[in-house]
Image (cartoon, rainbow, N blue to C red):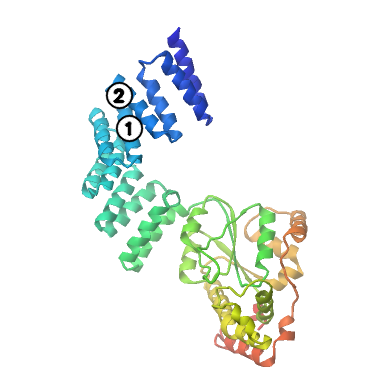
């Protein structure tokens, strides 16, 4: 009768564990053990529950009971090794992994765990040998290749390490996003190899599989003060996607695409708004991840006045020029001069870089102007929906605009033509002169 009752408690514990009720599952296994203390399997199962609750010392004692009852309990030796490794007791962990292997030598993950512990002791060549043994039993073990790569990192063989990471990622495409430290190791290797084109190509090959995703990126690459926050809010409302910056940092930092963030976003639909130029590294990422950017621009003369307003209402901190609050010691006209001389050149870099990318078909992109956006929001949003193949009706678009206008509007003055009113002739001529350095570029989208 007790045997049947113990089995029932064991079944109950498994069910509770499967739905995440670990405390209740633990109690059920303890009851099973109380009724049948000579059955090692219950101790082994209780040990799993305790590990899940991070009760490592209790789990260690529980698995020790299991091997006392059954000295041939292979998994229990392995589990003890994992616990000891978590407790940084690598020497004992290695001994228990070896016991598990002595009992059952054809389990590949016994060898990969043994290799990881061996690396912690500084025996990198031995770790490579253990992982090679793991691959004999499972040639598709991405972990074995990953641990070999780490060992090769430690001994300074960076080129071979990249090859091993490549094999690991081929077997497990999400490896880079699941293990950020791998990104760090690969970047370190590239730097040590001098970031030569052949090595960069190899690195991009490494992450190509990680880039494959059915999710959508909506990227707004925008001039500052071009209505980009408003457009982002419209698109968040229309799509239900997540606002997801793909940048390392803001403030004075150039808002380049940050590869780690892009990789971490591959599993979700995202809307991103960044002041992003079409540099070669950014375009490499855009091409690799099949990102189709919206490029949002505005009349360049009006931007000068909006930046002046931004200084007074929000902040002088921006990536286009290094400024602090001493700006406000200048006369108003001098501040306009500062904007024209120090900040507006960045806008020409931005515009020309995207103009070249567009004319040379380096990516699929959609031009949008601030003036179009404030004049006909429905049409612009409809064009964007079509560009991204979003199935949205005009009615849905109109409702989205109404909701956003009520709750999230950030268009500041939203007036066209203020640059012509506030800038003097010399300031306008300076801006026109900047455009003259690019006679082959059509600047009509920004009012020149």
Most foreground residue, 78 or 182: 78
> Is residue 192 visible in this depiction of the protein?
yes
The image shows residue 281 at horizontal and vertical percentages of 46, 68
Classify mark 2: residues with Cα within 10 Å, few (<14), some (14-19) or many (20+). Answer: many
Quote the CA–CA distance across marks 2 and 1: 10 Å
Residue in view at x 47 percent, y 60 percent: 259
In the drawing, what numbered circle is on residue 312? none
The quarter of the picture where the N terminus appears is top left
In the drawing, what numbered circle is on residue 67? 2
Residue 96 in which image quadrant? top left
The image shows residue 154 at horizontal and vertical percentages of 27, 55
Residue 138 in which image quadrant? top left
**In this rendering, is residue 424 above or below 20?**
below
Check disc 1 and report the residue beneath it: 80
Could you tell whether 147 is left or right of 392 in the image?
left
Most foreground residue, 358 or 21: 21
Residue in view at x 30 percent, y 65 percent: 193
Could you tell whether 267 is left or right of 91 in the image?
right
Could you tell whether 265 is left or right of 443 in the image?
left
The image shows residue 204 at horizontal and vertical percentages of 40, 60
């Amino acid at each position: 009768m007790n045997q049947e009752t113990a089995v029932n408690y064991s079944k109950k514990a498994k069910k509770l564990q499967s739905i995440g009720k670990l405390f209740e599952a633990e109690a059920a296994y303890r009851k099973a053990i109380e009724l049948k203390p000579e059955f090692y399997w219950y101790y082994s199962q209780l040990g799993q529950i305790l590990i899940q609750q991070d009760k490592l010392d209790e789990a260690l004692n529980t698995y020790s009971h299991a091997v006392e009852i059954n000295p041939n309990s292979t998994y229990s030796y392995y589990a003890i090794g994992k616990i000891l490794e978590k407790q940084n007791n690598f020497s004992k962990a290695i001994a228990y992994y070896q016991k598990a292997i002595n009992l059952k030598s054809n389990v590949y993950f016994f060898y990969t765990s043994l290799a990881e512990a061996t690396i912690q002791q500084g025996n990198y060549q031995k770790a490579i040998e253990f992982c090679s043994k793991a691959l004999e039993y499972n040639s598709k073990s991405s972990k074995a290749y990953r641990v070999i790569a780490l060992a090769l990192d430690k001994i300074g063989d960076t080129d071979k390490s990249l090859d091993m990471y490549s094999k690991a990622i081929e077997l497990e495409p999400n490896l880079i996003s699941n293990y950020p430290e791998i990104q760090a190791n690969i970047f370190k290797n590239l730097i040590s190899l001098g970031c030569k084109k052949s090595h960069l190509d190899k690195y991009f090959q490494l992450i190509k599989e990680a880039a494959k995703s059915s999710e959508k990126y909506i990227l707004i690459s925008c001039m500052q003060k071009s209505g980009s926050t408003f457009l982002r809010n419209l698109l968040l409302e229309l799509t239900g996607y997540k606002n997801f910056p793909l940048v390392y940092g803001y403030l004075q930092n150039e808002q380049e695409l940050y590869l780690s963030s892009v990789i971490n976003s591959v599993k979700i639909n995202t809307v991103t708004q960044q002041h992003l130029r079409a540099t070669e590294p950014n375009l490499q990422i855009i091409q690799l991840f099949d990102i189709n950017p919206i490029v949002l621009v505005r009349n360049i003369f009006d931007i000068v006045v909006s930046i002046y307003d931004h200084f007074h209402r929000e902040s002088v901190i921006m990536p286009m020029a290094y400024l602090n609050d001493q700006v406000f010691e200048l006369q108003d006209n001098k501040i306009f001069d500062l904007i024209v001389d120090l900040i507006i050149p960045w806008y020409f870099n931005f515009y020309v870089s995207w103009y070249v990318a567009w004319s040379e078909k380096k990516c699929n992109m959609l031009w949008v102007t601030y003036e179009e956006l404030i004049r006909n929001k429905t049409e612009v949003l409809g064009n964007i929906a079509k560009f991204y193949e979003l199935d949205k009706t005009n009615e849905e678009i109109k409702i989205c605009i109404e909701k956003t206008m009520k709750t999230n509007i950030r268009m500041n003055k939203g007036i066209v033509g203020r640059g012509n009113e506030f800038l003097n002739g010399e300031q306008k001529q300076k801006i026109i002169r900047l455009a003259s350095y690019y006679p082959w570029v059509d600047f009509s989208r920004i009012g020149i």
